[in-house]
Amino acid sequence: MKHFKPNAYGLYDMVGNAWEWTADCWHDDLTTAPLDGSAWLAADGGNCGRRTPMGGGWISGPGWARSSIRSNDPASYRSYMLGFRVAADLKRNAHAKN
């Protein structure tokens, strides 16, 4: 059963399932964050000993269950509240054979 409207891509319930474990290293502020979706790494001044999970999880309160929220956790941190998304370039997959 779907309780919320889909996002602009027609996907349901993309926020609040699990914190998304990103490839980004921790940066104290977002001033020089990449705008093209690429990972924000040590070469850009990041601390890769700490990582940046994003999006809030099922146990998070409403203020934490949003796509722009980020955390600052040790790279070795493990939790049942962390997950990751697998994504693919739609243009590339449009030519894939079924």
Image: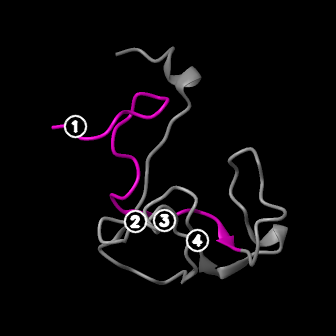
Of tags 2 and 3, the one toward the viewer is: 2
- Real-space Cα separation, disc 4 to disc 1, in angstroms: 29 Å
Quarter holding the N terminus? top left
Residue in view at x 40 percent, y 28 percent: 10
Label 3 to label 4: alpha-carbon separation: 7 Å
User: Along the polypeptide, which appears first: circle 2 or circle 3?
Assistant: 3
Q: Mark 4 points at which residue?
A: 52
Mark nearer the viewer, 2 or 4: 2
Mark closer to the observer (1, 3): 1
Say what secondary structure mark 4 lies in.
loop
Q: Main secondary structure of the magenta part?
A: loop
Is 3 above or below relative to 52?
Answer: above
Q: How many marks?
A: 4
Q: What residue type is labelled 3?
A: Trp
What segment is highlighted magenta in the picture? Answer: 1-26
Mark 1: secondary structure:
loop
24 magenta-colored: yes
Q: Do the residues labelled 4 and 1 touch (CB within 8 Å)?
A: no
Coordinates of residue 89 in the picture (x, y in percent): 56, 31
Q: Position of residue 61 (x, y in %)?
A: 37, 71
Q: Which quadrant of the view contains residue 17?
A: bottom left
Among the two numbered marks 1 and 2 on one chain, the one whose residue lies closer to the N terminus: 1
Q: Earlier in the sequence, mark 2 or mark 4?
A: 4
Residue in the image at 58% along x and 80% along y: 72
| Residue carrying label 1 | 2
The reply to whether dot 2 and dot 4 touch (C-beta < 8 Å) is no
Q: Nearer the viewer, mark 1 or mark 2?
A: 2
What residue lies at 48% left-to-right and 58% top-to-bottom? 66
